[in-house]
Image (cartoon, grey):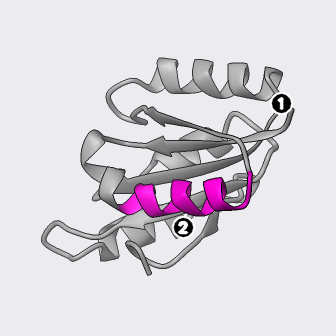
Amino acid sequence: MAWVAVLMGSESDWPTMQSCTEVLDSLGVEFEVRVTSAHRTPAATAEYVAGAVDRDCRVFVCAAGLAAHLAGAVAAHTTRPVIGVPIDGGPFNGADALLSTVMMPGGVPVATVAVGKA
């Protein structure tokens, strides 16, 4: 059965992503929540993406703040859609996370939403 992976760079991103899982649940969409980091655990992140695709994951929703590279790291390992959620906070109130998520090189597409819960 098709499902959605909801990934966060750290546990502190959960308050933002909880609303994402509530919407998925209300629509009857199966999902799995994971904390994985593009910086702290890059090999584990790549391994998770490969395994998720093998288990019929259809979309990855990736949230991270500050140097928010999780969505790009995931997109580098799959052709499935990746949605980046820049987390607000830090000295730039999420602007750095937004730019890190939206400024992907060619061939690494990431759909990016507004900063935080917006």
In which quadrant of the rendered image does the C terminus lie? bottom left
Residue under numbered circle 2: 103
> What kind of residue is marked 1?
Asp
Mark 2 surroundings within 10 Å by alpha-carbon count, few (fewer than 14), some (14 through 19), many (20 or more)? few
What residue sits 24% from the left and 48% below the top? Answer: 12
What residue sits 20% from the left and 76% below the top? Answer: 92
What residue sits 69% from the left and 33% below the top? Answer: 77
Secondary element at image label 1: loop
> What kind of residue is marked 2?
Met
Secondary element at image label 2: loop
Q: Is residue 18 magenta?
A: yes
From which residue to which does the magenta span run?
16-28
What residue sits 80% from the left and 45% below the top? Answer: 80
Q: Residue 87 location, x and y as percent?
A: 35, 64
Q: Is residue 24 magenta?
A: yes
Q: Of the numbered discs in the image, which one, if any, rests on residue 56?
A: 1
- Compared to 80, does 27 lie above or below? below
Q: Residue 51 location, x and y as percent?
A: 70, 19
Number of marks: 2
Q: Residue 69 location, x and y as percent?
A: 44, 49
In the drawing, does residue 64 fall left or right of residue 33? left
- Compared to 88, does 50 lie above or below? above
Q: Earlier in the sequence, mark 2 or mark 1?
A: 1
